[in-house]
Amino acid sequence: MTETVHVPLGERAYDIHIGTGIIASAGEWISPLLSRPRVAIVTDAMVGDLHLDALTRALDAESIDSVSLRLPAGEATKGWPQFTRTVEWLLENRIERRDVVIALGGGVVGDLVGFAAAVLRRGVRFVQIPTSLLAQVDSSVGGKTGINAPQGKNLIGAFHQPSMVLADIGALETLTPRDFLAGYGEVVKYGLLGDSAFFEWLEANGPALAAGDVDARTYAVRRSCEMKAEIVVRDETEQGDRALLNLGHTFCHALEAATGYSSDLLHGEGVAIGCALAFELSARLGLCSQEDPSRVRAHLTSMGMKTDLSDIDANLPGADVLLDLMGQDKKVVDGQLRFILARGIGRAFVTSDAPRDVVHKLLAEVLPTPG
Ligand code: GLY
């Protein structure tokens, strides 16, 4: 069964279709969007091996011709060289203004291809086919596209909404447990930021989700997409409320920078640790009860996820350096750090009012002692 979440953004509105077997029927979904039966697919080497044949067959079945490009897998792809290669490949293949480009893969491919589509001939349409949990619940939805700069992650990009998102729950079966749980960090984030009943549901159903229960996975992806869509519709270009989606990210970005954006810490793992820290900070500021951060940590731990800074298998810098790294976050406005704090589970809000000394003390206390 397929579930659909509509993202009502006026002339940029689109649907997110969620279910099993969606890649195998992608031609039927995509066909109504096309002005001629021809698409360009961009994927990466790893996802290409797993899913490109199935996608091509599905397009063939609807008499849609396709050309495909496989980029190298990994975060290093998300920079100018592979971006330039992608844009020039699309031009060489005569992708026109009214054509559709398909991004098949995780967050790296989705972000890069979305940005390529945003600038190609001043904007062509694109379809996201996210194959990682993180991409299905976060990066494929909402139109943030871009690449990394030497100065930081995602610093070059554009808002460009996809024309459709096809989230095939079956694709999650090919993820490693570590990658699945990293994506799960973003799922938990939704419960924590705005839906305590969803968090409670995750406490009960998280183990089934991790074990592969398709109905549970479909519900979790749907609920996450519904919540993201609702926030994006309120604030498409992050002038205010969209920053709620960054719960845990101020800490996470500092930790990712401190670990060199390496596999020592995956983005979703940093988000989970960051959420635990954001709740701890909220409790210390008297915004929520001490039971809330304990409950957050208990759930993450029970899922076998990284929860504490000591779970990161790398040497971390001291609290001063981490605070400086937080200061380089994109969310800094007029030099003021913006935090997403919470008045309880499901009750997050955006603030610039987190005293630096309290954040410093928290970091100093939770950092593992060297040796
Ligand atoms: N990943 C956060 C956002 O899309 O705003």
Image (cartoon, helix red, strand yellow):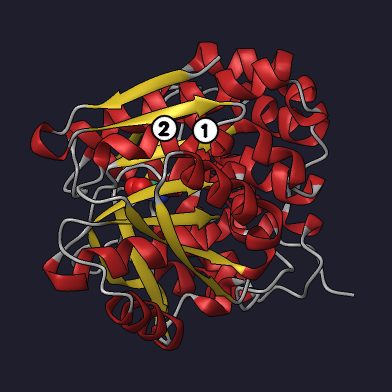
- List the residue tagged with mark 1: 25
Between the residue at mark 1 and the residue at mark 2, the CA separation in whole angstroms equals 6 Å
Residue type at tag 1: Ser
Q: Residue at x 63, y 61 (%)?
A: 48
- Residue in the foreground of this view, choosing between 36 and 101: 36
What x and y, as percent, mark residue 94? 26, 74
Judged from the image, the secondary structure of the residue bearing numbered disc 2 is helix
Q: Is residue 95 left or right of residue 328?
A: left
- Residue in the foreground of this view, choosing between 111 and 351: 111
Q: Residue at x 79, y 33 (%)?
A: 303
What quarter of the picture does the C terminus occupy?
bottom right
What quarter of the picture does the N terminus occupy?
top right
Callout count = 2
- Residue in the foreground of this view, choosing between 109 and 277: 109
Figure check: 13 above or below 55: above
Q: Is residue 256 left or right of residue 343?
A: right
Figure check: 58 above or below 220: below
- List the residue tagged with mark 2: 28
What x and y, as percent, mark residue 293? 62, 31
Marks 2 and 1: in contact by CB < 8 Å?
A: yes
Q: Residue at x 55, y 75 (%)?
A: 71
